[in-house]
Amino acid sequence: MEVKNFAVWDYVVFAALFIISSGIGVFYAIKERKKATSREFLVGGRQMSFGPVALSLTASFMSAVTVLGTPADVYRFGASFVLFFIAYTLVIILTSELFLPVFYRSGITSTYEYLQLRFNKPVRYAATGIYIVQTILYTGVVVYAPALALNQVTGFDLWGSVFATGIVCTFYCTLGGLKAVVWTDAFQMVVMIVGFLTVLIQGSTHAGGLHSVLEQAENGSRLNIFDFDVDPLRRHTFWTISVGGTFTWLGIYGVNQSTIQRCISCKTEKHAKLALYFNLLGLWIILLCAVFSGLTMYSHFKDCDPWTSGIISAPDQLLPYFVMELFSTMPGLPGLFVACAFSGTLSTVAASINALATVTFEDFVKGCFPRLSDKLSTWISKGLCLLFGMICTSTAVAASLMGGVIQAALSIHGMCGGPMLGLFSLGILFPFVNWKGALAGLLTGIFLSFWVAIGAFIYPAPASKTWPLPLSTDQCDLSNVTESVPPVLSSRPAIAETWYALSYLHYSTVGCLGCIAAGVIISFLTGRQKGKDIPPLLIRPVCNLFCFWSKKYKTLCWCGVQHDSGTEQESLENGNTWKQGAESALQNGLKQENLVPGYDPKDKSYDNMALEKITHF
């Protein structure tokens, strides 16, 4: 394959991204030097507003996995990927109305503190360990896969870009903490949108306009979006994306430390919810940009597919190759696209490093050393950022075995995120579930999701279930291209055609539902949790929505939790009340003052300023 190298201006544009990102870290390190506390470093002093947090959430979610993977997926399989707007909408609604209120009102820093409040330490530590492994693996994919694709198409140095990404992210995370991460993400979000729009405008102009792009996509069957086949083995259908996609991304948004940490850094619960809903607009914008980029790319390569013809070696290289052809006479614009891709990488990696440092400090370090000074806590937090930065960068090597970018990333989230979603759902929605059921459910969910995912990795699903759309090489010059020989498929067991052929988007569904089912059964077998021992703010009484006509049925579904005793209302108006009532659930060494932010009756929202007054009383 002919590699088209960067011009000087491409390197200038790309280097500017790293310089500005590092500069933000230095700025906040200097600005916040007098506020040297672990709370300030890890959660921004809990005084962030919704605007930058919303941009940060979108940037972290839309990593280089999306920038490179989604257009390639649309190019090969069609625009059904746009149905993820349904999944994104459901995920944001459920996160903001179901999970966020519990986490925010509990005053926690690590999401997994909730599991100790609701169950016990072993459940918390098991979940924290799984999260750390999941995040390190995912970050490896995010760092390595885009660097490989860009290296093989643009000649951009592979390991230079991998280590540059790791070093820059670690640098500004370690110096500036969460505020540096959030504001750098906001800047990188702008870069991503500009990069996508540049590709879309130039690509559609080259193809004869947007109408021509859509017409050619229609002729190539790329606009057959709605497929209502209920077969769960099909890779992408309406039901697979809307149901499986919701479970997958709810595991990322609803209970993931990286997301929740930035939400609880907001100064009020209302700001946290606004951050999520404004973030939804960002998700829709990036999704549409990625889908239209894939369609534009198809209109350009419809008669000479560079992947089938062997010009490139992997689908993830399609968009970089398209960009290098599109902007071959426009120095600086390829560099802008690479900056767009690496903006996604930087934002995701930085958020992951910050989240890993937070859960390790809150769940392990503070548990062993509860009386650390603020200064020492801050230095330990910075040291953890440095450590995880090095680990995540090193893990990028293993990502070369993971296959396609978008599917690999979502598979990792599904394998670990599904069982974690099930575990938190057991705690928040099922008051009768005890710690034994929770732990057994988590292990069951992990076993089921890893079983199906590893089986699918060994025995890939047949083409009849993935249904890639036809690609043409009729007008390719194949004289200098080596024709690849298709691999010989080994004998496949019967389970490979059913269980292992399950759509990758259902890995999370399997893990979550398996966790919930096992948790409920084990809890009944080992003795249900008494609802009167659970503080009301740890449970969301969703049954009120379905039994609104009958107080008797609502009370029955509360399973003994005292939602109507006045305790909950009093805690809304005075955080100290619920904090004192929760003492029976806190035989675990957690600081009492960290439990409940104050409630502002005028704003009808929790306010972290009140928490600060309580904690320093």
Image (spheres, rainbow, N blue to C red):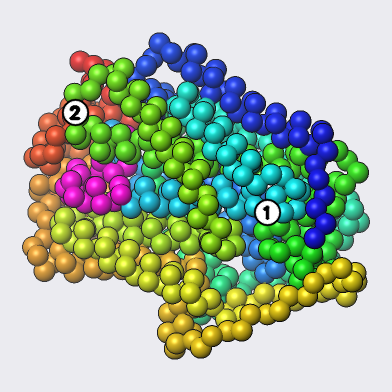
Q: Which residue is mark 1?
A: 149
Tell which circle, 2 or 1, labels the residue nearer the N-terminal end. Answer: 1
Rendered position, 138 above or below 472: above
Rendered position, 65 above or below 112: below
Is the residue marked by circle 1 packed among few (<14), some (14-19), or many (20+) residues within 10 Å? Answer: many
Q: Which residue is mark 2?
A: 370
Residue 205, percent from left and from top? 89, 51
- Label count reads 2
Can residue 541 be seen from the camera position used here?
A: no
User: Is 42 or 105 nearer to us in this picture?
Assistant: 42
Q: Quadrant of the C terminus?
A: top left
Q: Quadrant of the N terminus?
A: bottom right
Residue 475, percent from left and from top? 90, 71
Residue 49, percent from left and from top? 48, 27
Q: Name the residue type under label 2.
A: Pro
Of the two numbered discs 2 and 1 in the rendering, the one whose residue sits closer to the viewer: 1
> Which span of residues is magenta-colored?
108-129
Q: Quadrant of residue 421?
A: bottom left
